[in-house]
Every structure is written in structure tokens, then in C-alpha cells.
Image (cartoon, helix red, strand yellow):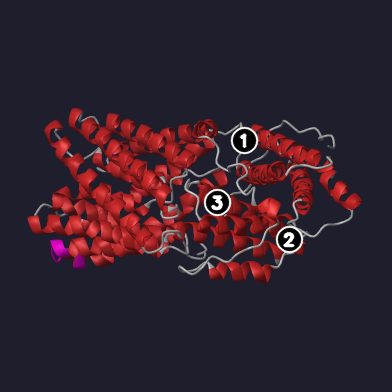
Amino acid sequence: MSAAPPTPTAPTTPRRLPLTGVLRPGRPSEIWFKPALSVVASMAPPNLTLLALGRLDLAMYTMAGSLCALYTHNRPYAARARALVWVVFGMVGGLAVALVAASLTDSAALLVTVGALLAAAQKVLCDATRVGPPGNVVLSFVTSASLFVPQSLAQVPGHLALAAATGVWAWLICMAPGLLRPHGPERRATAAALKAAAACAATAETDTGGARARAAGYAAVQAAWQSLLSTKAPSRTRRALERLVVRAEVALAAPAEADAGRLRAWADELRGNGPVPQAELPPAAAEELLGVEAARPLWTRLGPLTPLAARTALGCALAGYASLALGIGRPYWALVTAASLYQANITLTWSRAVQRVVGNVAGVLVFLAVVPLAHLGPAALVLSCLAFSFGAEVLISRNYWLGSVCVTPMALLITEFAGYQAPGELIKERVVDTVVGALVGLAAAVAVTDRRAGDRVERALAAADRAREDAARLLAGPDPGPAALESARRSLAVALAALRATADAAAGEWWQRALPHERVVLTEQSGHRTLAATARRQGLLPRRSAGTETEDARA
């Protein structure tokens, strides 16, 4: 292993925050229709029932449970069943804290503090458990809004029961597609890995775009492994999908030798319920598919999120206090705006702030256009909310600001479930709270620095070096076992994917020492060569001469 060059310790000058491309629409999610249809199916029966009973004032509590239908659509059904239960528990638990706090105090400042702490906890738990999209934003919206609804302790159990009942209904809605496509999520994740590997194979390795394609490919492969390994029960379908993911992984190790057309053809065959294409593997490799798991224990993911938790708590609290100081009657709008901003680093947080402000301003204009229709009667109000909830999920995967164009009028209309609100006042308060929440939230992100980002890059570099050395040591031996080779290859692939993700996240942070970019690139290059050599030893790639193979492993 080559000696590492000294790493500068002086803080770097903050880079210019981007504007180009922040609002550019992207490709929609392949499963955009699933959360869109699920949330409508989950919200419509409870809201229409309340409409028939003349109790639309209770719709906020039923919507709390119904909005759980937005989650876990990318997970296999066995894992989805477990994760969605926790989402419902988290939603009802956060709602319980908010309603009890609202019933015990009238202090708006104290309620903002409770909302900020809840938002920070929701952000950390959602990021650590990878629950999302939509992550913490929906949870924070519900709990923050509930803090400012007049409440008594005697009413809390009934309101929580409504949320829990609709949460159960949302669970059933999200699980229902499993009756038709029991392996749909795993097939989609595997297809995404194959397509990403094909894109990498079609791009020159020496090109900057090739490096990005390879990083995206490894991220897709790790997501596919997480999907497959989250289902404990083995099956023929799962084993066939594992072989395809191995093929995608091997293609990323040696993209110049991969057949991009064949990878795309396999991905296309995974659509629908047809037979899973059979990817042939050497017998020794096929018997040892279950190497190391890509997911780390939950507790190991909480520590790095500490700065993010501090940013969220501080930013949400200050945004709410600023809204109160300006005399706005709904400080939770500013609080939720701040909670929605925080991403993996400051650069991404800035992009989200721009998207949030643009989307909300456009959304209030849409609200101004549709409010006469919504005011035709309670039925029109309910149907308008359902239409906007569907539109939000259709658009938000293309760009966050496009989804906000529908989310904003929906949120404004929800305030009218309890009674008529003056549109002009609602629009003014929403715009002011959005701007205040974005400015204060962004200031908190800059003030609370993540000085350990560089340390995490160093640890990721060390982990990748260890994984590469372990694989090289096995390759240098006379007869490494197939299980050891598969485990070493998978460990190195996971370490390289983690290194790239850590380096990308750290690159967007401010006020930290200069990052070892050159070392990261060199470690990735040598790691990829060792991956290719390991795959050749396993028989997953054509063999080269012994001297060339040994040189690749030690590079």
C-alpha cells in the first residue's frame, strides 16, 4: 500500500452554492403511481366518511394515519410489513406527544420547542433506519400542526384511536399489491442494479461521467442487496435475483468486459410476473451467494447524524420563534419548512431551500386559483385535497419543488376542514413562514458545522484499504475457499460504495479541513482492480495470465 500524502488541516473556503440545475426536472420514479394511488386509497374512505357524518374537523387525525401509506413502497413485502408497523407507531407516538403538549400548555414558545425536538428525533430516526421517501417531513408536518390545535386531555385518546385505525387501513393498502406481485420490489431493485451496471459498461472508465456511473452502479447494487437480504425466507426467485445482482456487481468491477445489452435485456425481463432470467454462475460461486450484509447495525448509524440532529432542532426552534415574533398565527409552517431542508450536507440543504421556496410560492398561486372551487362545499374541499395529494406524488420524484406546488395548496385546504379561512390571510402567512423558515433553517445549517465529515472519510478510506488488502491476501494464497472469496469480494464492494457515499457527503460541507480527494480516487481505482481480480479467481470473469492477475490484486 502506498504511503498516504499528508492531509492539510486548515479549514477550506466555502464553495459557491449552486443555482444551475436546482430546479431542473428529472426522470420520474418508476413507481411514482404506487404512493400516489396508495395515499388516495388510504385517505378517501376516512375523509368521505367524516364528510357524511359532518365531522370534517376530525380529518386531521385520520389523515395522520392515512399519510403512512406514502412509506416503504421500495421494500419487499415481508420487510415492508415490519417497517410500516414502525411508521404507524412513530406517527401515532409523535401525534400523542403533540396532542398531550397542546392540552397541557398554551405557551406558543414552549410548543415550538416541543415541535423542534420532535422534528430532530424524527429526522434522525428516519435517516438512520432509511425510512423514506418521504422521510421525516410528513411526520413533522402532522406533529407540528397538531401542537397548535386546541385540545383537552379527555379528547386525546379518541383522536389517537382515529389515527391508529387509519394507520391500520394504510398498512393494508400498502400490503395489498403483494397478492399480485409478491416479489415486485426485489425485482425492481435488481432491475435497477442491472440498468446502472449497463450504464457504467457503456461509459468509458477514464471519463468523469464513467466514475459517476460506476458510483451510481455500486449504490444501486447495494440497494438491491439490502432489498434481497431484508427477506429472510429463501426462495427460488430470490436465489435467481441474487445471481443477477452478482452479475451486475461483476460488471461494475470490470465494465470494459461487460455486455451492456445483455444486462439491459435481463432488466427488461424482470418486469411483470414472468420467469426470472437465469444468470449462470460457476458452481463454487453459486453455492456461496450469501456473503456479507450491506446494512450496518442501527446504533452505528446514529453517531454520524448528531450534527444533523442539532441543525434540525436549532433551525426548527429558531424558525418557529421568528414566526412568533412576526405575529404569524401558524408558526408550525416555518418549523416544518426548516425541518424539510436538512439533507446530507450544506450544499444539498441549500438546493432544497431554493426548491422549497419556489415550490411554495408557486403553490400559493395554485391555491388562489382553486380556492373558489374548493369553497363550493365540503365535498369539493375533500375532493380537492385528494387531487392534490395524488398530484404531489406524481411530481415530487421529478423535483422537490414540483411536488411542493401540490403540497402547498393541499396543506392550505386542510386548515379549512375545521372552518372557513380567509384566503388572503392564509397566503400571506404561508409565504412569510416559508421565507422565514428557509432563511433561518439555512442559517442554522451553516452555523452547526459537521467537523467530523473529514474523520469519516479517513475511516472509510481505512476500511476500504483493509478490505482490499484482505482480498489481495486471499488471491495471493494457493487455494482460497469459494466462501472466503465471495465474502472478501462483497466486503470490498461494500467498502468502496461506502467510501464514495462518505466522500460525496463530505464534499458538500463547509468549514472543514481539506479532504483527501486524491487518496479517495487512488483507493477506488486500486479497489476496483482488486475486485476484478477476485471476480476472475471466482470464475466470474475470463482469466488473465497469473502475473497480470497478481499485479491487479496488489495494485
Numbered-mark total: 3
Q: Residue at label 1?
A: 453
**Amino acid carrying mark 1 in the image:** Ala
Identify the secondary structure beneath mark 3: helix
Of labels 2 and 3, earlier in sequence is 3
Q: How far apart, in angstroms, are the residues tagged by discs 2 and 3?
A: 19 Å
Residue with the mark numbered 3: 223
State the extent of the magenta-drawn residues as a range: 373-379
Crowding at mark 1 (Cα within 10 Å: few <14, some 14-19, many 20+) = many
Q: Nearer the viewer's eye, disc 1 or disc 3?
A: 3
Residue lying at 29% horizontally and 36% vertically, measured from the top left? 93
Front disc: 2 or 1: 2
Residue visible at 51% across and 59% down? 237
Quadrant housing the C terminus: top right
Residue 119 shown left or right of residue 28 in the figure: left
Where is residue 319 shown, x and y percent of the image? 38, 38
The earlier-in-sequence mark between 2 and 1 is: 2
Q: CA distance from mark 1 to mark 3?
A: 23 Å
Q: What element does badge 2 sit on?
A: helix
Q: Is residue 44 left or right of residue 11?
A: left
What's under tag 2, amino acid-wise? Pro
Query: Most extreme residue toward the right, as rendered?
Result: 547
**Residue 552 sits inside the magenta stretch:** no
Residue 259, given in percent of the width and then of the height, sits at 71, 67
Asked whether residue 409 is in view, the answer is no
